[in-house]
Amino acid sequence: MAIPFPSEAWAKALKDVLNNDAEYAQIARNWEGDFVFAIEPDGSLARPVYMYLNLWHGQCLEAMELADPAEKKAAFTLAAPLSVMVRIVQGKLDAMQAMMTRQLKVSGSMVYMMKNVPTVLKFVKCTQKVESEFPVDSGQ
């Protein structure tokens, strides 16, 4: 059954994917950092949606939707309009390319992220494993 993106249910489904992916666990075994995904209004998305993921040594310890991104002091914030996030999750837009072209805005240590590119890329691959339902006008 497809899970609406973005939503708390989607974040929790991603947590399950991450925690059941042996390759992710191996690649991300040294990763220490949590994320807030800030999905900016676009198309039918009238308000921003914030999803939080606490990633620690190859496991996702926590996943939830936040009412306000300030609820958690995350190491990284990834922000983009809904249409960009959807294209990344669908595998139609490379996340690293989106970062470099500033379609995906990153707050946090870019040095740390660049030292951990395999972890970042595997994480993105895991987002693509969630059976997702996207808003009709989200640029898919």
Image (cartoon, rainbow, N blue to C red):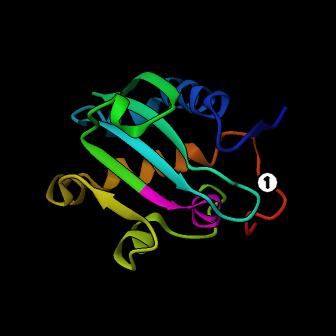
Report which quarter residue 111 is drawn in. bottom left
- Please provide the residue range marked out in magenta: 79-88
Q: In this view, does 106 lie above or below 116?
A: below
Q: Main secondary structure of the magenta part?
A: helix
44 lies left or right of 74:
right
Residue type highlighted by circle 1: Pro
Q: Decide whether residue 71 is among the magenta residues.
A: no
Q: Position of residue 15 (x, y in %)?
A: 52, 27
Report which quarter residue 49 is drawn in. top right
Name which residue lies at 37% across and 64% down: 105
113 lies left or right of 95:
left
Please state, as top left, top right, bottom left or bottom right, where the C terminus lies in the image. Answer: bottom right
Report which quarter residue 42 is drawn in. bottom right
Q: Where is residue 129 in the image (x, y as percent from the top left)?
A: 65, 42
- Residue pushed farthest top? 61
Name which residue lies at 39% across and 80% down: 101
Q: Position of residue 22 (x, y in %)?
A: 46, 29
Neighbourhood count class around disc 1 (C-alpha, 10 Å): few under 14, some 14–19, many 20 upward = some
* Residue sitting nearer the eye, 41 or 112: 41
Say which residue label 1 marks.
135
Please state, as top left, top right, bottom left or bottom right, where the N terminus lies in the image. Answer: top right
Q: What element carries label 1?
A: loop
Q: Position of residue 19 (x, y in %)?
A: 48, 24
